[in-house]
Image (cartoon, rainbow, N blue to C red):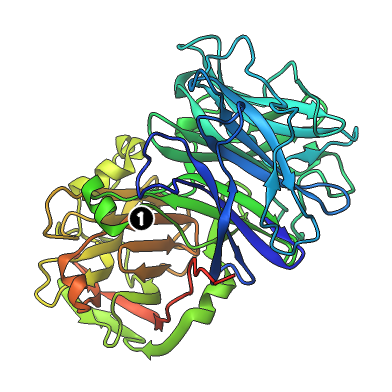
């Protein structure tokens, strides 16, 4: 949340070790002035009360009238750690600019477990908002109707932020999804209109403003979203989806990120009138490595989120503050051609870099024909057509975290296919050669980029942020994003390289390429006193 000039980041944290442990989690607390450099504070919440004895789990922050923040969170109760309830906490001293201490009222839980929800399937309250009727609302993830019940996002209303009543209708249900987690509902402004804040913007009814609903699905460990209409009278959400997607099955919706992230969460940054998205990227090597490092899991770079011109999808881009880390600028390959099988090194760029490129395809005539069944599984398509598999128009893109002998490298690339008299663009991140180490998850990730590449002048953009074990890529101006965790052995010797490559049969032009070394951010520094 943003409060009185300070950004606060609360996160699931085990103070006793680098891994999950027994699940008796606390809320870590860090603060920042710029969303880039962070200071660590003491934990905000710890499992000390009967209503959270077995863990302070996920939740959200809300700024109440008068500027007082409140934390809503899921607690696992004493005596039965499978029973989940919703609790509230307030700052002990609201005048403290860092909000270092929090108190949990004795009247918790504010929302007990419903009778029709199994104990361990009721969690993750959202940031609250106010409807036109003046009532507070939150959404909570649940599985209604027993262990084989329906994945539901329930709505609760309150006059006073203490007494909550469940709405008769759920916000949304998805019978096929199993259990969903970490719901997030927020408005998106139409193109050319300034962003609003859910429940706080005056003017037209909520149904006239489109919203995004994001759900995290347990059995796929992926985040899915849809743009749609939220009715703040009935408190229901109706997705607006394409023909290839199913409104009733959230697993067919678009994804914020087609890579290695989960449990994303957004907040409205009132200081810059923008929606900012965070996402959790956990480790993909062994738990023994986590313990040896002393930490496990990171947040992605914070991203600005807005509605695309087509009204069907959101776009994401690293917040502008990330650019303050840019140090030495490297410019090269402008207007250069990368021939079939070609590979050009970007000199001076290594394991901590920001690379922006625009690739132009002189001719699309030779593009391979797209098969309709490929729509169902772009990741499988990337697995079968990795960076080393020659194609016609593509693969072309970047090789990052590459060793001098190329035995280790991570490929971020595009392929273009002919589809229904138009063209389909596939974006992949291929980890199969990212490391020579064993016991590391090395998949290929993939998603389609929803653009008309002909209207874009037969060109497509790519921005990749490289930070040692994290590679975040934004294709087509942030329409498709892929985050990967990589663990190359050569990186320990600080000897990584970046290349532009083309493994298609036709040449590719690099109409723009800019790259920067990135300085080190100050992350979770602990100050004495």
Up-down relation of residue 15 to residue 73 (above or below)? below
Name the residue furthest front: 529
Judge the density around disc 1: few (<14), some (14-19), many (≥20) Cα neighbours within 10 Å: some
Q: Position of residue 111 (x, y in %)?
A: 70, 24
Up-down relation of residue 148 to residue 437 (above or below)? above
Quarter of the image holding residue 59?
Answer: top right
Up-down relation of residue 156 to residue 201 (above or below)? above
SS state under label 1 = loop
Q: How many marks?
A: 1
Q: Position of residue 210 (x, y in %)?
A: 71, 43
Q: Residue at x 29, y 74 (%)?
A: 351
Q: Which quadrant of the figure contains the C terminus?
A: bottom right
- 405 and 313: which one is in front? 405
Relative horizontal placement of residue 408, taking residue 282 as reference (left or right)? left
Relative horizontal placement of residue 44, taking residue 22 as reference (left or right)? right
The answer to whether residue 387 of the structure is visible from this angle is yes
Residue corresponding to mark 1: 295
Quarter of the image holding residue 373?
Answer: top left
The answer to whether residue 242 of the structure is visible from this angle is no
Q: Residue at x 37, y 89 (%)?
A: 331
Up-down relation of residue 77 to residue 242 (above or below)? above
Q: Position of residue 1 (x, y in %)?
A: 67, 55
Q: Residue at x 37, y 73 (%)?
A: 360
Relative horizontal placement of residue 454, taking residue 309 as reference (left or right)? left
Q: Position of residue 60 (x, y in %)?
A: 64, 43
């Amino acid at each position: 949340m943003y409060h009185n000039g300070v950004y606060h980041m609360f996160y699931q944290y085990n103070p006793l070790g680098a891994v999950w442990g027994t699940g008796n989690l606390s809320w870590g607390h860090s603060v920042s002035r710029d969303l880039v450099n962070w200071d660590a504070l003491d934990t905000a919440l710890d499992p000390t009360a009967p209503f959270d004895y077995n863990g302070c789990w996920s939740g959200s922050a809300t700024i109440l009238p008068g500027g007082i923040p409140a934390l809503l969170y899921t607690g696992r109760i004493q005596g039965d750690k499978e029973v989940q309830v919703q609790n509230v906490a307030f700052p002990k001293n609201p005048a403290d600019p860092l909000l270092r201490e929090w108190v949990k009222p004795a009247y918790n839980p504010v929302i007990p477990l419903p009778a029709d929800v199994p104990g361990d399937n009721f969690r993750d309250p959202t940031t609250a908002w106010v409807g036109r009727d003046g009532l507070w609302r939150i959404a909570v993830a649940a599985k209604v109707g027993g262990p084989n019940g329906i994945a539901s996002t329930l709505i609760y209303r309150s006059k006073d932020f203490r007494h909550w009543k469940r709405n008769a209708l759920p916000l949304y249900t998805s019978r096929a999804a199993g259990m969903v987690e970490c719901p997030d509902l927020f408005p998106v402004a139409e193109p050319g209109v300034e962003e609003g804040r859910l429940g706080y913007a005056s003017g037209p009814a909520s149904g006239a403003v489109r919203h995004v609903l994001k759900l995290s699905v347990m059995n796929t460990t992926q985040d899915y979203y849809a743009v749609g209409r939220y009715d703040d009278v009935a408190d229901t959400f109706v997705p607006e989806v394409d023909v290839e997607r199913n409104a009733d099955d959230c697993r067919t919706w678009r994804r914020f990120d087609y890579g290695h992230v989960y449990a994303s969460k957004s907040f409205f940054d009132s200081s810059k009138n923008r929606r900012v998205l965070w996402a959790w990227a956990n480790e993909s090597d062994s738990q023994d490595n986590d313990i040896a490092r002393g930490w496990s899991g990171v947040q992605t770079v914070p991203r600005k989120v807005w509605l695309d011109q087509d009204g069907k999808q959101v776009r994401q881009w690293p917040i502008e503050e990330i650019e303050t880390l840019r140090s030495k600028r490297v410019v090269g390959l402008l207007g250069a051609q990368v021939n079939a099988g070609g590979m050009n090194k970007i000199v001076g760029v290594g394991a901590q870099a920001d690379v922006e490129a625009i690739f132009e395809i002189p001719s699309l005539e030779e593009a391979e024909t797209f098969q309709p069944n490929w729509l169902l599984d772009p990741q499988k398509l990337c697995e079968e057509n990795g960076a080393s598999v020659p194609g016609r128009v593509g693969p072309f893109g970047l090789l990052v975290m590459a060793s001098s002998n190329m035995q280790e490298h991570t490929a971020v690339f595009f392929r273009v296919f002919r589809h229904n008299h138009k063209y389909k663009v596939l974006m992949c991140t291929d980890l199969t050669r990212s490391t020579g180490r064993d016991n590391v998850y090395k998949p290929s990730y993939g998603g389609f980029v929803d653009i008309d590449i002909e209207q874009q002048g037969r060109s497509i953009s790519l921005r990749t942020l490289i930070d040692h074990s994290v590679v975040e890529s934004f294709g087509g101006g942030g329409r498709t994003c892929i985050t990967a965790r990589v663990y190359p052995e050569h990186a320990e010797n600080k000897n990584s390289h970046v290349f532009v490559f083309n493994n298609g049969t036709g040449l590719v032009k690099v109409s723009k390429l800019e790259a920067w070394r990135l300085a080190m951010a100050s992350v979770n520094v602990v100050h004495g006193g």
